[in-house]
Amino acid sequence: MIICILQYVLETLTNYMKVSHLKHLLSTVALTLLLVSCGGNNTSRGTGWEINSKKGGFQYNIDFDEQETGPGLVFVEGGTFTKGQVQDDVMHDWNNTPNKQHVMSFYIDQTEVTNLMYMEYLNWLEIVFPTNETRYRQIYEGALPDTLVWRNQLGYVEELTTNYLRHPAYAEYPVVGVNWLQAVQYAEWRTDRVNEYILERESYVQKDVRYNEIDANSTFNTAAYLKRPETVYGGKIDSLAGKNGTVKRDTATVNVYAGVEKGLLLPSYRLPTETEWEYAALALVGDREYNTYRGKKKYPWSGEYTRSSDRRTEGDQLANFKLGKGDYGGIAGWSDDGADITIQVKQYPPNDFGIYDMAGNVSEWVADVYRPIVDDEANDFNYYRGNVYLKNVIGEDGKAQIISPDQLVFDTLPNGKVLLKRLPGDLDQVAIDEEETFLRQNFSESDNRNYRDGDVESSRNYSNGRPEDGSDSKLETKLMYDAPVNAKVTLDEEGNAVRSIDKSDKRTTLITDEVRVYKGGSWKDRAYWLDPAQRRYLPQYIATESIGFRCAMSRVGSKSRVKKSARHKRQG
């Protein structure tokens, strides 16, 4: 646009070279700069129509620069790396063999989620869904970490069961006792609170709405806002609009919402995939030389040892882990790693991405369902196992349905813990069906957790495209992996809890579609587990005193935040 204007100005100057009145010349140039446009940013290259006209028509954010970095996150530029064990495979494990993967750019929490951060979540739940109302009590109780994970039959740590989560002394320590499902629900809640704040900051809703207008019947959900904004805050959002939430059209006042096309709201906070977590932990950017890596990294930091080689900190440990039998911190007065259990976040130097505690402190849940083999032959781009595709439930009015407070649906886990599946105000969703999968080439069903490993075609019973018994029905993962049947807690006719477990002594594995990967060594692990390539798994409903989590967020738009240029330009 600027080039076009300058061209026009040059032509105008040439025409006015004979004009004797300089004032006339300058006014003409000024008018040209204001009025002339050769298909500027506000004009469609497709139709020539004006975009964002006050008269109406197509409205779009044509000034979008790049994605805002959400609270607590750091940017990680994606790239190609070798996932899995690359050196010192002393145990000869076969569940993390090296394979080359490419990761898209993303964001990840600078630190693990702390007790203070999680307590904010609990506080919000307690305010919005008061525990003195029986129907809401299980919402709060289902989100509570299991503080009894600290107990040890032959050790006295009882004070941790009552103090670790809530005492200010542990505020900046990573939260533990949280199972995978609870971590996912925290990330969903965090998404809504951050986007709710952004709407207020940008004056799409009135100030302090998030404090004054929330209750069980009036909450904010990002997905619901993007799909059916008029339903947010219990249908009151139009009356809560800020100065940018309305616009004048002729004599009418029209509500304006920050839809996807505005580029204002952030993508979802979520658990990182295993590939993202490992890539972020390795931080190979510090060992990069042009288009290659200079060496193989064993830890998130440079070097082959757990102690610092820098002059000022020489000999200091670079992570919080178990140094040996009975050695969780070192000799009193000269602690090797400064902790005996967990430790405050940011106590050790960050890696080259600026991320703290990617080794030690606590292990961390990631999003993936566990399988022994990473199927890089099927995919080597943003690898993730665990996709379950859903769609919105459409009502008789042709619109997406919203979950109301009187439609609370809880899920009882195998260990008897009760969790709320979805919060009131969320979009109601179901598994996709043939309407979405018919004649598709890239996916054929909703649940893809056992894709190419555990499905019929992958099982030992598969023959000529069908199970040996001739059944057309899809066999479950248990035919591929002989895992125990999930425990169940049910109620008898008198309302008493009946607990049942699989007591078979013929089970050969714990692998199911409900076991999740966790990464990184913790305060109670030896140095062997500090390698970012190491991977372990637990059922998604289990919590421990050594597993926490951090959140991630996808990057939309450009791969890099810095414009790339050739490193060496040929002369001549």
Image (spheres, helix red, strand yellow):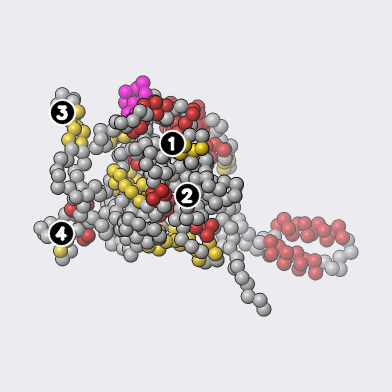
28 on left or right of 117: right
Going by the numbered disc 3, the residue's amino acid type is Asp
Quadrant of the rendering where the C terminus is positioned: bottom right
Instruction: Assign a secondary structure to mark 2.
Output: loop
- Determine the CA span between mark 1 and mark 4: 50 Å
Rendered location of residue 403, percent (x, y): 35, 36
The disc, 1 or 2, on the residue closer to the chain's N-terminal end is: 2
Most foreground residue, 265 or 248: 265
Residue 382 drawn at (x, y percent): 41, 57
Report which residue position mark 1 lands on: 340
Q: Which residue is labeled 2 in the image?
A: 306
Q: Nearer the viewer, mark 4 or mark 3?
A: 4
> Magenta span covers which residues?
131-142
User: What count of labels does the image hold?
Assistant: 4
Q: Earlier in the sequence, mark 1 or mark 4?
A: 1
Q: Residues within 10 Å of mark 2 (few under 14, many from 20)?
A: many
What kind of residue is marked 2?
A: Thr
Could you tell whether 545 is left or right of 252 in the image? left
Reading the image, the residue beneath label 4 is 461
**Type of amino acid under label 1:** Asp
Mark toward the start of the polypeptide (3 vs 2): 2
- Distance, label 2 to label 4, CA atoms, is 47 Å
Residue, x 53% and y 49% (percent of image)? 308
Q: Which residue is mark 3?
A: 492
Mark 2 or 4 closer to N-term?
2
Eye-nearest disc, 2 or 4: 2
Q: Earlier in the sequence, mark 3 or mark 1?
A: 1
Question: Residue 394, located in which quarter of the rendered image?
Answer: top left
Q: CA distance from mark 1 to mark 2?
A: 17 Å
